[in-house]
C-alpha cells in the first residue's frame, strides 16, 4: 500500500480557506484505494528551529550517523512517503514560518539527501509533491512577490522528487470575483491533479 504524507500548516485551522481546500483533497484521497494516508498537523507538533543545544545535538547525531534517533522522525517519515501533499496559506510573500522550521528539520544528510564528489542528490522515495494554498491577492506563476511555491518546487528537486504541482486559489480578497467561484475552480484543479497522483 502506498503512503501519502499530508502535511497541514493551515495556521487558522477550521477558519482557514486553505484548510477547506485541504479537507476536500483529504476526502477525495480517502475514497481512493491502495493508499495509506498519514496526516501531520504542524500546529500540534513541538517543532524547534536550530539554535544552541538543539543545533549541537543534531550535529553530534549526524556525526554518529544515528539516523534512527527520534530527532529525525520527521525526515524519516518524509523520506519513506510515496506521495507528499502540503497545505499552507500564502503568508508574508511565502508561507508560515512553521512550515520552514519543519523543512529545516527534514534536511538531513543520509536520510532525505546525500552528497558525493558530484554534489548533492535527493534520496526521498516520493515521486510527486503537491502544494495546496490560498492567496488574498493574485500572483501568476513567476511573480517575484510569490516565493512560497518556487521555494517548495526547489526543495522538491533537492529531495529527489520528480514531479511538483501547485494548486492555488488566487485573488480571494480582491473583490473582483466571487470567492466561491475561485474556491470551486481550485477544487476542480485539485481533483485533476489527484487523478494523476
Image: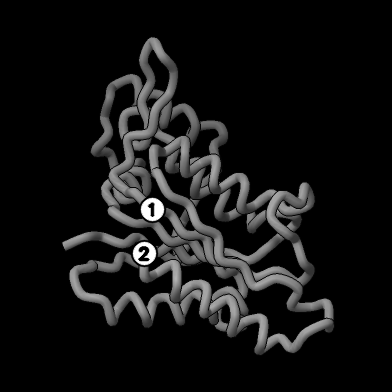
Residue drawn at (36%, 44%) of the image: 75
* Quarter of the image where one finds residue 114: top left
Q: Residue furthest left?
A: 1
Could you tell me if residue 9 is visible in this image? no
Of mark 2 and mark 1, the one earlier in the sequence is 1
Label 1 crowd (10 A; few <14 / some 14-19 / many >=20): many
Q: Which of 76 and 62 is in front in this view?
A: 76
Q: Are marks 2 and 1 in contact (CB under 8 Å)?
A: yes
Does dot 2 land on a helix, a strand or a loop?
Answer: loop
Does 98 sit above or below residue 186? above
What residue is shown with label 1?
128
Can residue 118 be seen by looking at this rendering? yes
Q: Position of residue 30 (x, y in %)?
A: 29, 79
Query: Would residue 36 be found to the left or right of residue 84 on screen?
Result: left
**Does 16 sit left or right of 28 as displayed?**
right
Disc 2 to disc 1, how far (Cα)?
A: 9 Å
Between residue 122 and residue 65, name the one nearer to us.
122
Q: Is mark 1 on a helix, strand or loop?
A: strand
Residue named by callout 2: 196
Question: Is disc 2 surrounded by few (<14), some (14 to 19) or many (20+) residues within 10 Å?
Answer: few
The structure residue drawn at horizontal position 34% and vertical position 20%, both measured from the top left corner, is: 63
Left or right placement of residue 156 versus residue 174 in this view = left
Q: Quadrant of the N terminus?
A: bottom left
Amino acid at each position: 500500500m502506498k503512503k501519502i504524507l499530508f502535511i497541514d500548516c493551515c495556521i487558522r485551522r477550521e477558519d482557514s480557506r486553505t484548510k477547506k481546500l485541504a479537507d476536500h483533497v483529504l476526502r477525495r484521497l480517502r475514497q481512493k484505494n491502495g493508499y495509506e494516508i498519514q496526516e501531520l498537523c504542524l500546529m500540534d507538533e513541538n517543532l524547534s528551529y536550530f539554535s544552541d543545544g538543539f543545533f549541537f545535538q543534531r550535529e553530534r547525531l549526524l556525526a554518529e550517523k544515528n539516523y534512527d534517533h527520534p530527532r529525525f522522525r520527521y525526515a524519516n517519515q518524509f523520506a519513506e512517503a510515496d506521495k507528499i501533499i502540503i497545505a499552507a496559506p500564502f503568508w508574508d510573500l511565502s508561507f508560515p514560518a512553521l512550515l520552514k522550521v519543519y523543512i529545516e528539520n527534514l534536511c538531513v544528510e543520509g536520510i532525505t539527501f546525500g552528497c558525493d564528489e558530484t554534489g548533492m542528490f535527493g534520496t526521498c522515495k516520493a515521486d510527486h509533491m503537491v502544494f495546496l494554498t490560498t492567496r488574498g491577492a493574485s500572483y501568476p506563476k513567476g511573480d517575484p512577490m510569490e516565493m512560497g511555491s518556487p521555494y517548495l518546487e526547489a526543495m522538491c528537486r533537492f529531495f529527489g522528487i520528480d514531479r511538483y504541482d501547485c494548486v492555488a486559489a488566487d485573488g480571494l480578497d480582491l473583490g473582483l470575483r466571487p470567492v466561491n467561484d475561485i474556491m470551486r475552480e481550485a477544487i476542480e484543479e485539485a481533483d485533476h491533479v489527484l487523478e494523476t497522483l
